[in-house]
Image: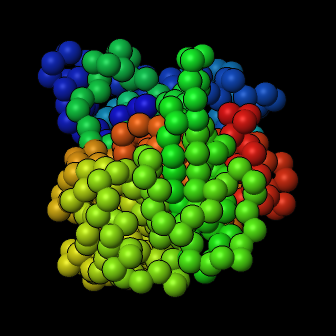
Amino acid sequence: MKKVYKSVEKLDKKCYEKYDLSEDLLQEHAALGMYNHIKSLPNIKTILIVSGSGNNGADGMALARLADEEYNVTLVTLSEPKTTMAKLQLQRAKNLGIDIQNSIELRDYDVVVDAIFGTGLNKELSDFYINAIEILNNINGYKIACDIPSGLGFKNGCFIADITITMGGLKLALFNDDVKDITGEIIVANLGLNSKLYEDNSSFFLLEETDITLPFRNKLSTHKGNYGHLLVVSGEKLGAGILASEAGFALGCGLVSIMTHDDKIFLPPHIMHTHHIPYNLTSVAIGMGLGNFEEDEIKHILSLDIAKVCDADLFYSDVILEVLNDSKCVLTPHPKEFVSLLKICQIDDISVATLQQNRFFYLQKFCKKYPDITILLKGANILIGNGDNIYINTLGSSILSQGGSGDVLSGFIGAYLAQGYTPLHSAINGSLALTLSSRNYQYNNYSLKPQDLIEGVKNI
């Protein structure tokens, strides 16, 4: 798990003031981080570095100086340097005879480095920069973004990277839902000091593969009751309930039951069918295709003093208000459902588009009003909110963009809840199980079924 920051400005300032590390020294290490990555690439001869007028541009100029001995480097400066470091780095490049141009030639390079704008960009790009970035995107070559891709988060143009080498610490802007196809791989360049000294407190955390805890059975003298009993409440859309039930078994539940009003249903033999609430439940998954359940029945189930995962239909009904102060509950809305939930809770009335542009903001707003509950917001990147903290799961892909994936997720989370994991750890582990399972099918991602995600947890 890694810390993520809205801004690293305070962290850089701490380096200057507390550790007596100069801006120049940090910049040299930023350039060195990019240079070391380029050296790891095979068959590299030509490098194009395009720099802006600020400190992001200065990083690019420093890289040009480091790379010039080993590679054929072209440095393009799009405007006169404005910051002290940009002026210094450009003068150093000139002193060493670096090939410096004022415009971008549209031809192939082995590596293209975008060092035009960093995190300081606070307005839409001018036509000049839109055109420059468009040219860079049309050049064939391995694309590196210095710190963040130029134009990230703005509407009228953005550099599309194969990799983003971000300086010192991870930035929150790199994990918005609409930038996953823009940033490419994200790595952090060390700035010349122990990362533990550089970092500070944060409310945002990036989940990694190694953060998952699988519910291994380590004791020998046990029985099925030791591993929990998950109840899946299913209405007319029984398929959703079956997927959630199968997912519950796949992640260790001792017993799984489906509760329906229908007598004529066919279930796998290991899933029990009931019309009533079993006495020995340890968790409930509810919301998937509720259909013919009456509101009073739903309220009664939600009032049970056991762990719950709530999904789908519940987010369009006022009955969801029954659980919003329940610390044993996990909510799993997708964006449209979350927008409905925000309106029901009288937090805000927004469009899905507005939410998608401000996912962290609205999730924090919800968690501030309901600090006891755990909420998982689905998307290209899964966000999990609990109290002051937000956890980011970037490990999924378009493989999960199909009906049934959310039902499998509910079953995974319900399984962890049934076995006594906390709601937060159930949401984290359930989401990691889903996304890591999907990685088993990256090479034939067009052919995946939700059942494959259930089978895939065997290979995590």
State the residue in front, 71 or 95.
71
State the residue in front, 72 or 411.
411
- Image-quadrant location for residue 239: bottom right
Q: Which residue is depicted at the point 60% across and 16% down? A: 220
Q: Position of residue 69 (x, y in %)?
A: 64, 20
Vertical position of residue 241 compared to residue 206: above or below? below
Q: Position of residue 278 (x, y in %)?
A: 47, 56
Q: Which residue is depicted at the point 62% across and 62% down? A: 273
Q: Which residue is depicted at the point 53% across and 61% down? A: 232
State the residue in front, 103 or 115.
115
Q: Which residue is depicted at the point 71% across and 77% down? A: 264
Vertical position of residue 179 compared to residue 393: above or below? below
Q: Residue furthest left?
A: 17
Q: Is residue 239 left or right of residue 133?
A: right
Q: Position of residue 129 (x, y in %)?
A: 48, 65
Q: Quadrant of the C terminus?
A: top right
Protein image colouring:
rainbow
Q: Is residue 346 left or right of residue 235?
A: left
Q: Quadrant of the N terminus?
A: top left
Vertical position of residue 197 compared to residue 428: above or below? above
Q: Position of residue 358 (x, y in %)?
A: 35, 66
Asked whether residue 97 is in view, the answer is no
